[in-house]
Amino acid sequence: MTTQTEQPPRLFEGREPVFPQRVSGWYRRLKWWLMIFTLGIYYITPWIRWDRGANLPDQAVLVDLANARFFFFWIEIWPHELYFVAGLLIMAGLGLFLFTSALGRVWCGYACPQTVWTDLFILVERWVEGDRNERIRLLRAKWSFRKARLRITKWVIWLLIALATGGAWVFYFADAQTLLRELFTGQAAMVAYGTIAVLTATTFLFGGFLREQVCTYMCPWPRIQAAMMDEDSLTVAYRDWRGEPRGKLGKAEGDCIDCMACVNVCPQGIDIRDGQQVECITCALCIDACDNVMEKIGKPRGLIDYCALSDEPLERAGATPKTIWQHILRLRNFIYFGLWSLIGVAMVVALFIRSDFSASIKPDRNPRFVTLSDGTLRNAYDLKISNQTGAAREFHLSIKTDDPLRLDLQGVDGMNITVPADETMHQRIYVFAKPEYETSRMDNAPIRFWVEDRASGERNHVDSFFAGDSK
């Protein structure tokens, strides 16, 4: 008797390549325009010039890591002003919450870099290999000269796009014109070549081969979005009450004729008729595909559309559902928008009222004090003054304390120092206590250092302490 060996169940299913079909419609045109707009911003921005005067970079947007500075057109952010960057990140997060609450994963479907570059790579793939059916046939065909030629052509174009992507990124961190020349002459820093290589590889891999897997498995946002949405959030959905029971044209009781057009155009390879799924990025291409089919068979558009869960009972009953603005203009979204606006206004106000200079003082910790030959106690401090204007400025230093202390600047006559334009100066300063004074009770005595701009009269202060002999 022969026994058949049972095969163990498969615990992993290999990836089935997704080949989206070409579709035309309002949402597809919107995605084309947004792709052109976002890619244009990314590639063009480093080349925009902005005259800031002598000794300052004339690149409009520049993250100057060497000098610890961030330039954005007329705005210059110094290291001690990183709260502006933190504010922008908070605004970005709140904006993402707002758009998700109102329109679902609209960011993922239209403006996410992964979506934008994947769209571009699919466009190249379709241009080289043909539409969906041709690409499927090519995948299943045996290797031949034609298949190799098409694949190599596609991969080379992808690689050039990926190289341009990595190259554009490094131009945000150095003068674009100078760095471009250095890259081609081999004079650029190795970190520039390394960054370009990493970004080229990741763009080529994510946009060309991983695609929907990045959105489904690598991105955390699909798991977070559920907390941002409720029954009034608009998202791409299938009106099953109208489409079911589906069937072939002429035999279907519902409007859906099971043509699979919505599935064939989906870049995630899912069936929107199965309900809400974590893979769906709400790109709305299935809406365009379904509307085109509905027009051809004489059915109303909107079988697949942007709608909310709260609309379904009303539509089933034949009542008028809420309008788009009723879904968007509601308390939850107003709260998100209010918080977003509040942070934005606070940042703008802080930007206009910020001082033109800043000062910081760091006392020596080892030793805390030095006893001179005549018994005088001396504390040393490192003073740092940042002149955030385009002209050299003179600053006057003084101290305010209840104790008899004396201030002295190392290597400087008097209490005035000049800081060059748009630079930070480090100055060694000393504070002395007379030997006849009871220094034991002065340990950790508070001191306020004042820094005054002699030209404008603006003053900033820094609080510190004087370390005395506590024995």
Image (cartoon, helix red, strand yellow):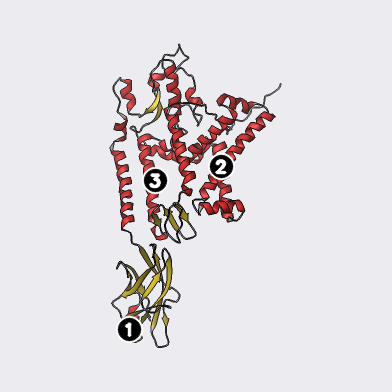
Q: Of the residues under marks 3 and 1, which one precedes in the sequence?
A: 3
Q: SS of the residue at dot 2?
A: helix
Q: Is tag 2's residue or tag 1's residue first in the polypeptide sequence?
A: 2
Q: Is residue 18 left or right of residue 316?
A: right
Query: What residue type is disc 2 on?
Result: Ala
Residue position marked by numbered label 1 in the rendering:
438
Instruction: Name the amino acid type tagged 1.
Output: Glu
SS category of the residue bearing label 1: loop
Name the quadrant containing residue 274: top left
Please tell me how crowded label 3 is: few (under 14), some (14-19), or many (20+) other residues with Cα within 10 Å: few
Depth check: 170 or 367 in front? 170
Amino acid type assigned to the residue bearing label 3 in the image:
Ala
Vertical placement of 401 versus 17: above or below? Answer: below
1 versus 268 height, above or below = above
> Foreground mark, 2 or 1?
2
Residue at the image position 35 percent from the left and 73 percent from the top: 465
**Quadrant of the rendering where the C terminus is positioned:** bottom left
Question: Is disc 3 placed on a helix, strand or loop?
Answer: helix
Query: Tag on residue 92?
Result: 3
Identify the residue at image location x=42%, y=57%.
52
Where is residue 443 shown, x and y percent of the image?
Answer: 35, 77
Decide if residue 153 is on the left or right side of residue 406: right
Q: Percent x, y for residue 337?
A: 31, 42
Q: Where residue 386 sits in the image (x, y, percent)?
A: 40, 65
